[in-house]
Image: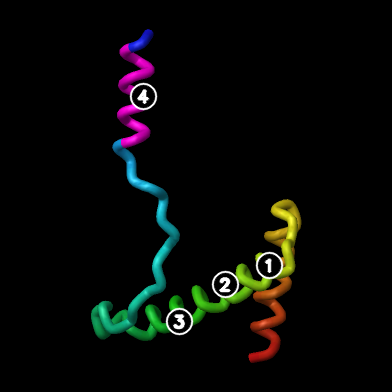
């Protein structure tokens, strides 16, 4: 039993910390996919802005998805 706990502890420590998804860099993408990469980067920036607004307004986790959806729809309507 102690060996199993020891192995599990080692396995947990060996795994690195979870990282968030990085922004797409269109300059590092093949030219034929650059337009799609630019669109994806713009979408990621909009999502991060809405997430930051949710954090600043201290939106509860249970309401966060609805808040983010409304925020993204409002940003799309402005454009």
Which tag, 3 or 1, sits closer to the chain's start?
A: 3
Whether the residues at callouts 3 and 1 have beta carbons within 8 Å, the answer is no
Picture quadrant of residue 74:
bottom right
Give the vertical position of 38 relative to 66 (above or below).
Answer: below
Q: Nearer the viewer, mark 2 or mark 3?
A: 2
Task: Give the residue at x 25% y 85%.
Answer: 31
Magenta region: 3-13
Q: Which residue is mark 2?
A: 47
Task: Give the residue at x 33% y 40%.
Answer: 15
User: Between marks 3 and 1, how big is the CA–CA gap?
Assistant: 23 Å
Work out which residue is located at the far bottom of the displayed protein and give it. 79
- Residue 39, given in percent of the width and then of the height, sits at 45, 81
Q: Nearer the viewer, residue 69 or 2?
A: 2
Q: Nearer the viewer, residue 3 or 20?
A: 3
User: Between marks 2 and 1, how big is the CA–CA gap?
Assistant: 11 Å
User: Between marks 2 and 3, how big is the CA–CA gap?
Assistant: 12 Å
- Residue 72, given in percent of the width and then of the height, sits at 65, 75
Q: Nearer the viewer, mark 3 or mark 4?
A: 4
Whether the residues at callouts 2 and 3 have beta carbons within 8 Å, the answer is no
User: Between marks 4 and 1, how big is the CA–CA gap?
Assistant: 36 Å
Q: Nearer the viewer, residue 16 or 78?
A: 16
Magenta residues, dominant SS class: helix
User: Between marks 3 and 4, how big is the CA–CA gap?
Assistant: 42 Å
Give the vertical position of 23 relative to 60 (above or below).
Answer: below
70 inside magenta stretch:
no
């Amino acid at each position: 039993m102690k060996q199993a706990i020891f192995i599990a502890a080692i396995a947990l420590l060996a795994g690195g910390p979870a990282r968030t998804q990085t922004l797409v860099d269109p300059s590092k993408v093949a030219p034929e996919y650059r337009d799609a990469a630019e669109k994806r980067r713009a979408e990621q920036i909009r999502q991060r802005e809405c997430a930051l607004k949710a954090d600043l307004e201290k939106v509860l986790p249970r309401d966060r998805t609805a808040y983010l959806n409304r925020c993204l729809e409002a940003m799309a309507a402005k454009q």
